[in-house]
Amino acid sequence: MSDDDQDRKPSKPRTKADTRDRLIDSAIETLRTRGIAGTSARTIAAAAGANQALIFYHFGGMEDLLAEACRRTTERQVAKYRDRFATAGSLRELLAVGREMHAGQQAEGNVAVLAQLLAAGQTDPALGKVTADGLALWVNEIEAVLVRLLRDSPLADIVDPPSLSRAISAAFIGLELYEGVDPAGGSTALNAIDQLGTLVELVEELGPLSRRVVRSKIRRAR
């Protein structure tokens, strides 16, 4: 036996978990580079270096594989920004996190994946549910921040955190897609959202008497 043979270590056998992970990562990358039209069991398996029959063995079919891929990539992204969400002390700071996240999602190509899933979900109820479930992870995270930030705000009487969290999520999704065709317009829209954050801060900084007046007017308006 040569020295090279003695030094060469046997390769570690791949486990079922390894194969599942490779297929999931390949599904995400295939969506990112080929789009939904070019995403199939064959293209995903080829990217993963696996037999396409393993997709059906591990996931039962493409629908469940794409669902798992969407869930996993969203969980990773949510976890990446969770600490930043937790330290946001105002709506403007939350919007700043949104800007940072927005830039990161574009740079990593995740906006392209989301665009493909959103488009396919319009005509495919199964993919629509997959995408909605993934977006719900973001909505829930943002809702928790809004509940904390608005708890003692004079705006608490008129703002519904679950609804507002969906509105914010929808706004950023729309901007991510819109910027693909009009980058300058998307930037302007983000600035407008920041201005709304400034307006909320001004209300928050009012003195006790003014805050009571605002609360009273809000209640009457409702």
Image (cartoon, helix red, strand yellow):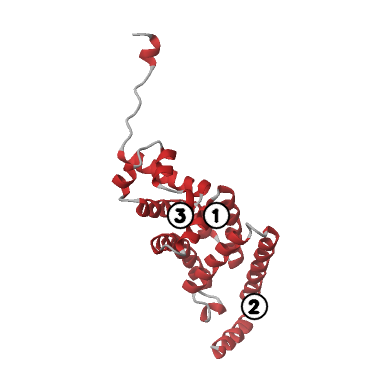
Say above or below: 101 vs 190. Answer: above
Question: Tag 3: residue type?
Answer: Thr
**Which residue is label 1 attached to?**
111
Is residue 47 shown above or below 141?
A: above
**Considering only order in the chain, which callout, 3 or 2, is on the residue closer to the N terminus?**
3
Mark 1 surroundings: few (<14), some (14-19) or many (≥20) residues within 10 A:
many
- Three-letter code for the amino acid on which mark 2 is drawn: Leu
Q: How packed is label 2: few (under 14 Cα within 10 Å), some, or many (20 or more)?
A: few
Against 8, residue 142 (above or below) is below
Q: Is residue 89 visible?
A: no
Instruction: Judge by depth and name the residue closer to the eye, 195 or 65.
Output: 65
In this rendering, the label closer to the viewer, 2 or 1: 1
Q: In the rendering, at what x and y percent does residue 75 appear?
A: 43, 54
Q: Mark 2 points at which residue?
A: 206
Who's the residue at 37% across and 54% down the image?
63
Within 10 Å of disc 3 (Cα), the crowding (few <14, some 14-19, many 20+) is many
**The N terminus is located in which quarter?**
top left
Residue mark closest to the camera, 2 vs 3:
3
What residue type is disc 1 on?
A: Val
Pick whichever of labels 1 and 3 is earlier in the sequence: 3
C-alpha distance separating marks 2 and 3: 38 Å
C-alpha gap between disc 2 and disc 1:
39 Å
Q: Label 3 belongs to which residue? A: 74
Residue 153 sits in quarter: bottom right
- Secondary structure, mark 1, is helix
Q: Is residue 177 left or right of residue 116?
A: right
Of badges 1 and 3, the one in the foreground is 1
Q: Which numbered disc flags the more N-terminal residue, 2 or 1?
A: 1
Residue 36: x and y in percent read 48, 53
- CA gap between label 1 and label 3 equals 11 Å
For the point 52% across and 65% down, which residue is it? 169
